[in-house]
Amino acid sequence: MIRGFLILTHKLLLIPNDEQRLIHHFKSFILKLILSVMITNKTYFTPEELIKFSDDDFKSYIFLLQDNLQKKLKTGETIDEILDKEDPFESLEPLLPEEVYPVLVLAMINNIRSETVMEALIEGFNKGRDNYKDNT
């Protein structure tokens, strides 16, 4: 599915200049759509798939996971009940440094989306991705 997205992205570059501003929004929409379909089917990305994400893809993925988690919390489910059924953080744990992982969990549960927190998560993701690649 991601491979198709990459091909689609390549074709988007052929759009005339006056329509270029739509490319970013369209790519974000397609990524969210793909991620949404995957998450609603209770399919999360593996660490091997996540290491291929750009910073923007990673940020969009975190926001999508937050949205999904917040929907469940708003229905009255507790975080413990959610974690008994699934662990939305599981595939991110091997990629994030020990000091960044708790920041991710708290940001997800409390729906924190500030630039400062996102920059810390992205920085941790980049460091963790490099370490993960070196160890596999």
Image: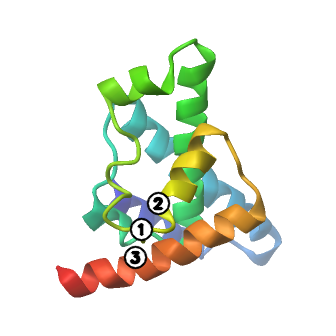
Task: Tell which residue pokes out farthest to the bottom in this image.
Answer: 134
Residue 6 is tagged as none
Asked if residue 61 can be seen in this view, the reply is: no
Q: CA distance from mark 2 to mark 1?
A: 6 Å
Which of marks 3 and 1 precedes in the sequence?
A: 1
Residue 101 is tagged as 2
Closer to the camera, 92 or 63?
92
Residues under numbered marks 3 and 2 in contact, where contact means CB atoms less than 8 Å apart: no
Up-down: is 39 above or below 13? Answer: above
- Is 45 left, or right, of 134 in this rendering? right
Residues under numbered marks 1 and 3 in contact, where contact means CB atoms less than 8 Å apart: no
Which picture quadrant has residue 41? top left
Q: Position of residue 30 (x, y in %)?
A: 54, 51
Q: Amino acid at mark 2?
A: Tyr
For the point 43% across and 60% down, which residue is it?
Answer: 5
Closer to the camera, 73 or 23?
73
For the point 65% across and 55% down, which residue is it?
Answer: 26
Up-down: is 91 above or below 44? Answer: below
Closer to the camera, 135 or 55?
135
Residue 98 is tagged as 1
Residues under numbered marks 2 and 1 in contact, where contact means CB atoms less than 8 Å apart: yes
Residue 128 is tagged as 3
Q: Amino acid at mark 1?
A: Glu
Q: Check the image and tell me how it is coloured.
A: rainbow
Classed neighbour count for the residue bearing mark 1: other residues with Cα under 10 Å, few (<14), some (14–19), many (≥20): few
Q: Amino acid at mark 3?
A: Gly
